[in-house]
Image (cartoon, rainbow, N blue to C red):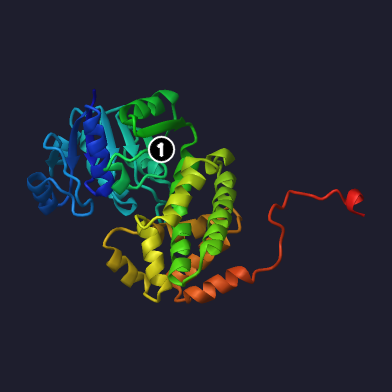
Amino acid sequence: MASVGVIGSGTWGTALAMLLYKKGHHVTVWSAIGSEVESLSKERFHPNLPGIRIPEGIRITGDLKEGMEDKELLVLSVPSVFVRATAAKMKPWCGKGQVIVDVAKGIEDGTLLTLTQVIGEELPEADVAVLSGPSHAEEVSKGLPTTCVAAAKSRRTAEFVQDAFMNEVFRVYTSPDMLGVELGGSLKNVIALAAGIADGLGYGDNTKAALITRGIAEIARLGTAMGGNFRTFCGLTGIGDLIVTCASMHSRNRRAGILMGQGKSMEEAMEEVHMVVEGVHSAKAALALSRQYGQSMPIVEQVNQVLFEGKSAREAVNDLMLRDKRAEISQALWDEAENS
């Protein structure tokens, strides 16, 4: 069994720490917030994982050196907006070849880098991987069956991460497509905001199905243009993660979207959700990438207008519906001779 440091004590970091501990690993969880360290250490409950007790054997610390030193595996589980700053703080204790698995989902605003690329810039000697998929912390903490994907530059690292996490209720597949896995996990949050907005407006299952299917089409268009594998977007970290994020009330992105569909501003929605809404942070980056790579992403465009330009949610949906006519699959052709 391995010695593991979980860097970040949010719901996802805590759920994964419990999963790793139950598998027999020695687990230390680091938090940057002193009051959180004290509360988790004494109470052994996370406020956003009600009814789930954190085992006494999991060490909670506010000392980053203690959280990292002599660890065979580091799990970086901080919100995407804090990944670069946290990785920079980790530098003094990161050794050559240190395996760091990122479990956050997002694209850095400004640089348009994926999170493993951000970590690679700050910690160039680390061996960086990503673990992603349809996996709400609330369900993983309860031991409900879940599947994810571990992606890395080398098969050896991906299989190391797979072995570290996989158990009878948490199945892990491997993939060499780090870019595709990260893009699917990041961009689905933007589509989930749109799905939530539609729910808040009182629209139905037809609308939700349209947003999911046209949303994955947008994600796959951009992802393949950037070099991702099309099949990745058809799998767990593409359509799988998109479905769960658009459909579940565990999804903070969907919940924030519902509130905006009901008339609240983006700021009001984020305040009411009480947790980081990653789709808000990824929306601008997604739009910038679509323009950089010349890919049409009308749902992403409308979400940005609602978030940052004061456009009403209902008007955004109307504009999506009233776009110019087009074929669903542009490469599909009729046999003109047969139909003449």
Residue at image location 48% in from the left, 76% down from the top: 311
Q: Could you tell me how many numbered marks the image carries?
A: 1
| Residue 206, quarter of picture | bottom right
Number of residues whose C-alpha sits closer than 10 Å to that of mark 1, classed few (under 14), some (14–19) or many (20 or more):
many
- As shown in the figure, which amino acid type bears the numbered disc 1? Cys
Q: Indicate the position of residue 282 as horizontal and vertical percent values.
A: 42, 57
- Residue 187 is situated, as x and y percent measured from the top left of the image, at 47, 53
Residue 55 falls left or right of residue 119 = left
Report which quarter residue 227 is drawn in: top right
Residue 2 coordinates in the image, percent (x, y): 24, 25
Q: Up-down: is 281 above or below 75?
A: below
Of residue 283 and residue 288, the one placed in the foreground of this image is 283
* Image point (11%, 37%), residue name: 56
Query: On the rendered structure, is 52 left or right of 280?
Result: left
- Identify which residue is drawn at 72% across, 53% down: 330
The correct choice, above or below, for 207 with respect to 201 in the image is above
Q: Nearer the viewer, residue 27 or 212?
A: 212
In-front residue for pair 166/203: 203
User: Which image quarter is the C terminus in?
Assistant: bottom right
Image quarter of the N terminus: top left
Find disc 1 in the rendering and name its residue.
148
Local secondary structure at mark 1:
strand
Q: Is residue 12 visible?
A: yes
Q: Is residue 86 above or below residue 292?
A: above
Say whether residue 91 is visible. no
